[in-house]
Amino acid sequence: MQATWWILIHGGFLAILIPFLATAWEMWIFNKRHEYMHNIKYVLLAVDVPKTTEQSPLAVEQIFATLSSIRQEGTLYERLWKGRVVDSCSFELVSLGGYIQFLIRTRVDYRDLIEASIYAQYPDAEVTEVDDYVDRISVDFDSNTYDLWGTEFQFLKPNVYPIRTYADFEKTLAEEFKDPMAALLEVMSRIGPQEDVWLQLVLTPADDHWKHEAYHEIKSLIEGKKHSKTGFLYKLLFSWPLDTLEWLGEQIIPLWGDIEEEKIKEEVRTVQQLTPGQKKVLEAMERKLSKLAFYTKFRLIYWGSRETFLKGRGVAAVVGAIQQFTVSDMNGLVPGKRITTKTEYFLKESRLDHKQRSILYSYKTRDVHRGLGHGVILNIEELATIYHFPVTTVKAPLVKKTEAKKSEPPVALPVFGTGSYLRPAREVEYATGGAGKTGAIPSNLPFVE
């Protein structure tokens, strides 16, 4: 007892105090962030693209570039006391019983920004506010009636390695673009009336912090050294002790004979010594770094009644369509094992039930903190490859598109009627007369008696 007390009063209390304060701080920040996000008002927008659009995914890439402007961290007081976080938007593609719809969920504050960026690239598109489809199934769904499969995708390699982008889907000889959305939309159009497939990309504009690890990976590729982790805990437990031992070895070895003058030098490769394949990978990595990027939570949910639920149709086919973005010597997207609703060995049913409801809750709330860390890093070119409006050659029958082309009426359009005008008088605020006066109809407005 005395030994314990002596340890406590001579600094041992720090072993208890520091973890306690760290846990209390994490709980404080978590609650403040939850409160901040709970008070934000969101809107869900359905996007209907024209039937005859000739726009390539480059147009959607510009939309994502515009969206990067929502990164506003706020002041230190707002982040620590009010729980402010960087805002995010969710780009979603759903098949509701075979009916396919492109959707965007965003803060009400950013609705004009989203609509303006879409109309700038697709003037004939239609953007409509709709009810949230996630209410079609409850988190507490009856597992005897419904079945659900869900996952969050992760990278095969570090974030700096890019996936296959839309530029690689273009045939050079025929100059024909093979839209990667064709396979995905065809699969989603085969979903039956009592089942749904939901795809979600929750995007948070990324800062430049992730690029430090990216440059370290590029350096490792050039020098031919194995990539090592750079986290503080990894350095504390492994890197620094190993570096210390290596330094001690360098001091001791010269004392062992005639090799004092001989120093082992590591051969460092240059870019010129890389193979053609390695140079191609290096160029692709640098191209990814050159464009704006987002932390991305990429989720997939497939659910349906027990009678119609079929993994081969709603899981294998959709995941297979996403595999077309994989490049063997670069990167690819695969379901994260820790998140995927699959269990083995002990307590299978209870663990499966927990995983199903956890991934469904994360999807319904568009949560950016639950799951696999911050998500994967995708730049605007990679995002436009995964999520873009199909080109004219894609014939998926149940994709919602605009029915007719809209155009503005002529400026000098006459109005028929006796003394009536196109627009009634309206209340306006004059610069000199104040509010509440009725605005007069312009005297030169054409009309026909």
Image: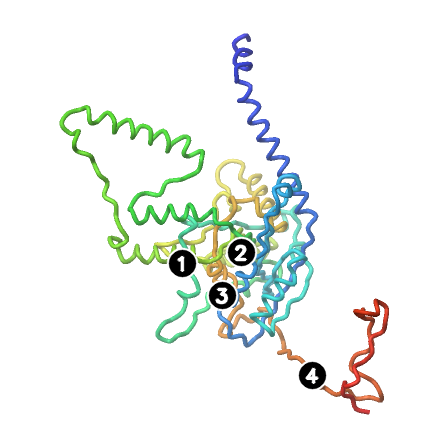
Residue hosting label 1: 287
Mark 3 crowdedness (10 Å alpha carbons): few <14, some 14-19, many ≥20: many
Report, in whole angstroms, how far the alpha carbon at label 2 lies from the one at label 1: 40 Å
User: Can you name the residue that lies furthest to the left here?
Assistant: 258
Viewer can see residue 33: no
Residue at 62% across, 62% down: 113
| Residue 271 relative to residue 35: left or right | left
Residue 65 image position (x, y, % from top left): 53, 61
Is label 3 in a helix, a strand or a loop?
A: helix
Mark 1 crowdedness (10 Å alpha carbons): few <14, some 14-19, many ≥20: some
Residue hosting label 3: 181
Q: Earlier in the sequence, mark 3 or mark 4?
A: 3
Cβ–Cβ under 8 Å for marks 2 and 4: no
Is label 4 in a helix, a strand or a loop?
A: loop
Viewer can see residue 442: yes
Nearer to the camera, 110 or 364: 110
Using the image, determine if residue 53 lies above or below residue 210.
below
Residue 92 image position (x, y, % from top left): 58, 59
Residue at 60% across, 64% down: 101
In this rendering, which labeled residue sits more in front, label 3 or label 4? 4
Q: Amino acid at mark 1?
A: Arg
Residue hosting label 4: 411
Quadrant housing the C terminus: bottom right
| Residue 110 relative to residue 440: left or right | left
Q: Amino acid at mark 3?
A: Met
